[in-house]
Structure formats: structure tokens, C-alpha cells
């Protein structure tokens, strides 16, 4: 199948995509090299700047639902699709995070007519991912941003009061992740950290958190994984130094302080899964102007979400294996205001008390641990 890779209405490259595997088989031509997805070009040597098919395929596959997503196997079976990668073509690769998509050759489609920011989208895939079997698979519409949603937890996009809202569930015995997102939001609100606000809801007796997309028809998210792959890493640089070097080279402002704030919150909530795919940077997709660090989001895999051993040390990501080591990277804590967190333990108890799966003793242990970890940062 022949497509044009588009950045909004700008043709970027001509592609051939296999109808059997969903992978990019050939790059026919490049029209706008500066608008190629970041991290898909060779970063050093004589061929520096040339788009590389393997890298572009990595980026393309990274847009699809991961194989680890809860319920994905049964969902694919219900719609007769063999792999998540094949879902990308069903929605032209469109997402609610950035402005890339693929336009079928000769179709005449335009961004304004297909993007999910200003146009409606099908609820079918979201409902199927939540376990509903379609009455008639042949009538299912796969024109949905659910085909390009990342992460392993059950989730779907909905429209509420005209806003594009992500609805995400929990896991395990405690289904704690939705509550953790709200707790992290409250901590960041008190500390005046730019973040994505989360709220809680229940559906069919299960807890979910809701958050509105912070991308807009003009502003897009570029994940950190794309930024670090934009330059070859020097053996002299640590992972953290490499990211800062990449940001400096690209001209992204205010990065080190913003990352320090994110790592501080991750330490307070004992976040176990701050990987390069769930933080990033925002830019104007038309001018390619970098606006800075994205609002902090996706903090649910925290607060000992899967264990009864509250307060124990957990491994951290992405720069160091312990939160203490990561906090050593934070050289500026002048912004940290412990007084703003007074009473945060009561707020944690209040939020967790809404769960039927988390008892009072667990609530209390988590609340005390949050306050204690914040106090330890105050004592630095």
C-alpha cells in the first residue's frame, strides 16, 4: 500500500507499507527532511540526516498498542486483526498526541477532515479494548485514537463536554493506579509543577482516572525517547547528561529544572516506571519551535501499587536505579516548598478512601510514607 507520511497538511515522505505486517517496506522519497519524526534519521557519520527505514519502522511500531496491553489479544481476535501494528492503517496512524499521519496515495484527504482533535471518532475500539464483544465485527469502525494509545493498562479515549479525555484503569488486587494519578496531581498542584490534572470515576464498579489531552491542533508532544535518539550518545555521557545535551542541541528551553521537579515528585511517590516514553517535550508542529518540557503525566505506577510492603525501596527509572541516586541529579531545589505539602497525608487518605480494594491500614501506611519521603527531600 502506498502512503504519504504527513505532518498535518505537509507531505513529509512517500512510503510503502505492507498490508500483511504493517511495517514500512520502502521509503520512496523525502519531501520535508526537517519534519521527519525526530530520531528517525542517522545521527552521525557521512550519512548524518538521512532517514533510516529501521529507525522509521521503530517509530511507526511505537505508535501502536503494545502487545502487553491488558485485553489486546481478545480485542484483536474479535475484530479479525492479527497484530496491533495493522490497526495503525485503520486510523491513518492518527493520534491525540502529535500531528503525524499517513495519507493513502490519491485519496485527497486533508488534516482538517481526519484529525481527532477537531473531528469525531469511533467508540468501537475503545469498547472492545474494555472487553465488549462486537455484535457484528463487520460493522466495527476502527477510525479511533485508541489504535495509537500507548501503555499496558486498559484505556480508551472519550469525548466529554467537547474535550478529548483519556480514561485509564488499574491492575492487580488494589486497582490503585487511578488513585495514584490523582494523588500525584495533588502533590504537583501544591508544589506548582506543570502537570496533567487527573480525576476519578467508576464504571461497572471499577475505578478509572480521567485526563484531558494537553496536545492541541497546534501543539504536539514529542516523547523523550525520540529526543535521545536524535543524537549519538557519547561514551563519556551518562544517560541524564545525554538527554540534556540533546535538548541543548535542539534548543529546548528550561529542561534541567523541569526534569528535576519531575524526579522529585517521582521520589515522593516512589514511581517505578518513569521511562523515556512517558515524559517528553512540546513543540509547535508547524514552525517546529520547541516550547519546553511537557506537563508531567502518567505517574500511576507508584505508591507501592502492586505490593503490601508499603514504604520499601523500589527501583527507579530512567536515569538511575534508585530514587536516591536520581535525586542526586537534582541540583536545584530552591523551588521545593515543604510547607505546601503539609496535610498531604490527610489528602492521600481521603483520595484512597474511595477505593473498595484498599483498606484503612494500607491507606494510612501510604499516606505516612508520602509525607516521610517529602520530609526527607526537605532535609537535603
Image: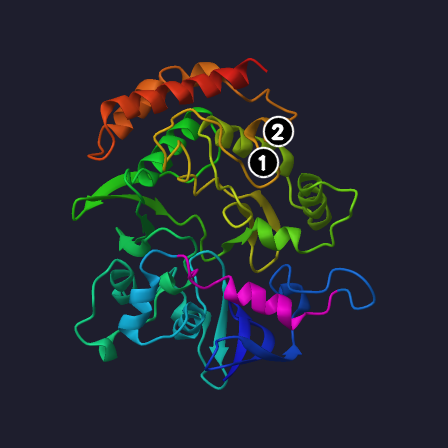
Q: Residue furthest right?
A: 46
Is residue 53 inside the magenta stretch?
Answer: yes
Vertical order, 7 against 353 (above or below) = below
> Residue at coordinates 45% horizontally, 58% vertically from top-left?
217
Query: What's the mark number on residue 325?
Result: 2
Q: Whole-percent x and y of residue 97? A: 46, 56
Mark 2 lies on a secondary structure that is helix
Q: How is the image coloured?
A: rainbow
- Asked if one can make out residue 254 in the rendered structure from this viewpoint, the answer is no
Circle 1 packing at 10 Å, graded few (<14), some (14-19), many (20+), is: few
Left or right side of 278 for 172: left
Left or right side of 276 for 95: left
Residue 119, image quadrant:
bottom left
Query: What's the mark number on residue 61?
Result: none
CB under 8 Å between discs 2 and 1 = yes
Q: Residue furthest bottom?
A: 106
Q: As rendered, which of 51 and 238 lies closer to the eye? A: 238
Magenta part of the chain: 49-68
Residue 258, image quadrant:
top right
- Which image quarter is the C terminus in? top right
- Asked if one can make out residue 25 in the rendered structure from this viewpoint, the answer is yes
Q: Which residue is mark 1?
A: 321
Q: Whole-percent x and y of residue 24? A: 56, 76
Q: Whole-percent x and y of residue 202? A: 20, 43
Left or right side of 197 for 49: right
> Residue at coordinates 26% horizontally, 66% vertically from top-left?
124
> Residue at coordinates 34% horizontally, 62% vertically from top-left?
72
Q: As rendered, which of 274 and 14 lies closer to the eye? A: 274
Residue 16, image quadrant:
bottom right
Amino acid at each position: 500500500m502506498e502512503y504519504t507520511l504527513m505532518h498535518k497538511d505537509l507531505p513529509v515522505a512517500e512510503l510503502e507499507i505492507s498490508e500483511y505486517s504493517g511495517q514500512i517496506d520502502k521509503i520512496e522519497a523525502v519531501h520535508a527532511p526537517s519534519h521527519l519524526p525526530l530520531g528517525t534519521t542517522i545521527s552521525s557519520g557521512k550519512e548524518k540526516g538521512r532517514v533510516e527505514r529501521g529507525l522509521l519502522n521503530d517509530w511507526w511500531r511505537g505508535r501502536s498498542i503494545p502487545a502487553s496491553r491488558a485485553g489486546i489479544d481478545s480485542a484483536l481476535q474479535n475484530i479479525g486483526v492479527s497484530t496491533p501494528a495493522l490497526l495503525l492503517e485503520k486510523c491513518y496512524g492518527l493520534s491525540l498526541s502529535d500531528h503525524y499521519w499517513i495519507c493513502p496515495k490519491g485519496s485527497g484527504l486533508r488534516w482538517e477532515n481526519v484529525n481527532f482533535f477537531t473531528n469525531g471518532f469511533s467508540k468501537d475500539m475503545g469498547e472492545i479494548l474494555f472487553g465488549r464483544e462486537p455484535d457484528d465485527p463487520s460493522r466495527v469502525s476502527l477510525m479511533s485514537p485508541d489504535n495509537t494509545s500507548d501503555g499496558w493498562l486498559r484505556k480508551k479515549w472519550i469525548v466529554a463536554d467537547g474535550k478529548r479525555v483519556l480514561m485509564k484503569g488499574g491492575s492487580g488486587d488494589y486497582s490503585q493506579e487511578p488513585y495514584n494519578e490523582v494523588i500525584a496531581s495533588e502533590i504537583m498542584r501544591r508544589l506548582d509543577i506543570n502537570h496533567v490534572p487527573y480525576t476519578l470515576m467508576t464504571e461497572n464498579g471499577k475505578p478509572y482516572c480521567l485526563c484531558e489531552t494537553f496536545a492541541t491542533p497546534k501543539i504536539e508532544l514529542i516523547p523523550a525517547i525520540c529526543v535521545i535518539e536524535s543524537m549519538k550518545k557519547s561514551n563519556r555521557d551518562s544517560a541524564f547528561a545525554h538527554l540534556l545535551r540533546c535538548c541543548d542541541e535542539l534548543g529546548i528551553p528550561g529542561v534541567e529544572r523541569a526534569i528535576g521537579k519531575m524526579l522529585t515528585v517521582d521520589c515522593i511517590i516512589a514511581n517505578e516506571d518513569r521511562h523515556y516514553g512517558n515524559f517528553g517535550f512540546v513543540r509547535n508542529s508547524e514552525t517546529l519551535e520547541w516550547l519546553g518540557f511537557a506537563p508531567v503525566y502518567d505517574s500511576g505506577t507508584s505508591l507501592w501499587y502492586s505490593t503490601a510492603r508499603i514504604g520499601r525501596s523500589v527501583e527507579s527509572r530512567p536515569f538511575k536505579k534508585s530514587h536516591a541516586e536520581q535525586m542526586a541529579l537534582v541540583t536545584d531545589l530552591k523551588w521545593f516548598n515543604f510547607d505546601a505539602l503539609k496535610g498531604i497525608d490527610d489528602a492521600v487518605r481521603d483520595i484512597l478512601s474511595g477505593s473498595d480494594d484498599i483498606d484503612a491500614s494500607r491507606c494510612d501506611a501510604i499516606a505516612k510514607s508520602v509525607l516521610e519521603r517529602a520530609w526527607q527531600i526537605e532535609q537535603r
